[in-house]
Image: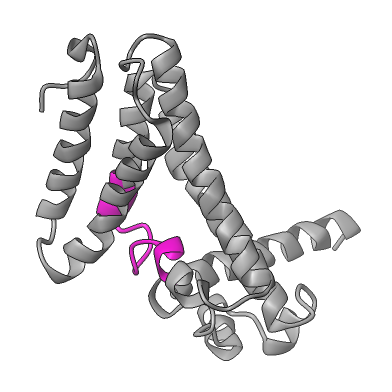
């Protein structure tokens, strides 16, 4: 095998491990990651892990990076195809709900699980998780601000407040879909954000009625 072939094989192996790590961590948290279980799930020997990671913490940090990349590819990128303004803001919320509804991760949301795991534990992992979550909040705030600047939301909208509400309604799906409402939680979360945006939009016909 050529050097390029070995490099490509190594990259694929690393990505397969990270994909499985994010999937498992969405249920059990990052501390619940077992090298033995990951090795069995991906067909990788335990010794093979050390070709990619020097220790478990580096694997955990890379799992956070992978989860952020997955979030960008499956939620942010599809939303960016919608017209800028209030329609893109709603498309972002719908893409998130679709991610949850399709069961991409067995635990629903990687970041929902790990934020509770590391919110009171200072260190590199907490900092990386916090940065990813802050980046997400800031992205929503920018979409709100852009919609205001375009005249598609009323001028006195508090961008930080509205972004918080949209994020909170999306996050609530994780709890309710498993413990309370099941699939109905997706309907409630979609309708709540849609009604909020329509009430703040000078031209509500830009958004669906329901």
Q: Position of residue 160 (x, y in %)?
A: 42, 37
Q: Position of residue 144 (x, y in %)?
A: 41, 27
Quadrant where the N terminus lies?
bottom right
Asked if the stretch drawn in magenta spans residue 178, the answer is no
Q: Position of residue 27 (x, y in %)?
A: 38, 75
Residue at position x 24%, y 56% in the image: 173
- The colour scheme of the drawn protein is one colour
Asked if the stretch drawn in magenta spans residue 106, the answer is yes
**Residue 182 image-quadrant placement:** bottom left
> Does residue 125 sit above or below 169 in this rendering?
below
- Residue 83 visible in this rendered orientation of the protein: no
Tell me: 60 left or right of 192: right
Residue at position x 47%, y 77% in the image: 117
Residue at position x 55%, y 87% in the image: 34
Tell me: 149 left or right of 178: right
Tell me: 9 left or right of 25: right
> Does residue 46 sit above or below 16 in this rendering?
below
Tell me: 93 left or right of 173: right
Number of on-image labels: 0
Quadrant where the C terminus lies?
top left
Question: Quick one: which residue is furthest to the right in this view?
Answer: 3
**Residue 61 image-quadrant placement:** bottom right
- Magenta region: 97-113
> Does residue 112 sit above or below 184 in this rendering?
below
Name the foreground residue: 137 vs 78. 137
- Residue 86 visible in this rendered orientation of the protein: yes
Q: Position of residue 189 (x, y in %)?
A: 19, 45
Residue at position x 50%, y 29% in the image: 142
């Amino acid at each position: 095998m050529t050097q390029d072939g070995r490099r490509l094989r190594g990259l694929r192996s690393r990505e397969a491990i990270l994909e499985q790590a994010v999937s498992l961590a969405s249920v059990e948290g990052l501390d619940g990651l077992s090298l033995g279980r990951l090795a069995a799930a991906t067909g990788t020997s335990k010794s093979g892990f050390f070709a990619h990671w020097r220790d478990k913490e580096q694997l955990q940090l890379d799992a956070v990076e992978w989860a952020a990349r997955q979030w960008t590819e499956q939620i942010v990128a599809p939303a960016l195809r919608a017209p800028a303004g209030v329609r893109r803001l709603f498309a972002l919320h719908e893409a998130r709900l679709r991610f949850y509804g399709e069961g991409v991760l067995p635990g629903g949301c990687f970041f929902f699980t790990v934020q509770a795991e590391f919110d009171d534990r200072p260190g590199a992992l907490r900092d990386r998780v916090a940065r990813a979550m802050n980046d997400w909040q800031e992205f929503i705030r920018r979409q709100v601000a852009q919609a205001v600047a375009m005249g598609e939301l009323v001028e006195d909208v508090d961008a930080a407040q509205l972004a918080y509400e949209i994020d909170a309604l999306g996050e609530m799906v994780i709890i309710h879909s498993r413990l309370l409402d099941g699939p109905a939680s997706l309907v409630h979360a979609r309708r709540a954000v849609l009604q909020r945006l329509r009430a703040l939009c000078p031209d509500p016909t830009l958004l669906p009625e329901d």
